Amino acid sequence: TEPAPDSGAQGSEMAKAIVLGMALFGLWLTLSGYLTPFLLTLGVLSCMFAILIGARMGLIDEDAVPLQLKSRLFTYWIWLGRETLRSNIAVARVILSRRMDIAQCFVRVPTSQASDMGRVIFANSITLTPGTVTVGTASGAFLVHAVNDAAADPEAFAEMDRRVAALKQPPIVRGEAR
């Protein structure tokens, strides 16, 4: 006989499915831009179908729907947006200068990320930052192509790694012993 399913686990799975459904529908709505009832219905149905397939394949897990990231993710996005803007300006200066200071290089960037989700967020954040592209992964490190030495700053990569690692930390409750 099989053990009875845990209702808490089922509730958690349902919450993940609902959050994923809202995210998928939000993405669909943003990309389509159509607000007619027929197309909205098709969008909802296609999102529900995608969630059903994902659930049947066992893909709706902690890495696919990281509910614990929700509170810190927006703060990280704001920080990443500022860093992307700064890098855009730096790369534009290099491109628009009379003497293009391009000294392409590959650097090994160590990572402290323990989960696949953390590694994906870190690698994508590096790639989103102008002047750098993550081109390879190895155990505990990424291979990053940088447009010049300034873009290959190890302190900047370490700060990004620290901030991504902080996304996965459980929230600290005031008054809680450390």
Image (spheres, grey):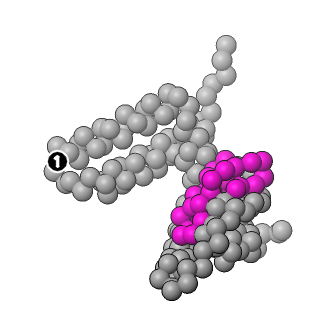
Q: Secondary structure at mark 1?
A: helix
Residue 75 position (above or below residue 40) = below
Q: Which residues are magenta?
A: 116-143
Q: Position of residue 106 (x, y in %)?
A: 70, 61
Q: Position of residue 54 (x, y in %)?
A: 48, 34
Give the residue number, with chain letter if any, for mark 1.
Answer: 37
Q: Is residue 19 left or right of residue 137?
A: left
Residue 41 position (above or below residue 150) = above
Identify which residue is drawn at 50% across, 32% down.
55
Q: Residue furthest bottom?
A: 98
Q: Residues within 10 Å of mark 1 (few under 14, many from 20)?
A: few
Identify which residue is drawn at 24% across, 56% down.
33
| Viewer-proximal residue among 139 and 166 | 139
The number of numbered discs placed on residues in the rendered structure image is 1
Residue 174 position (above or below residue 54) = below
Q: Residue furthest front?
A: 99
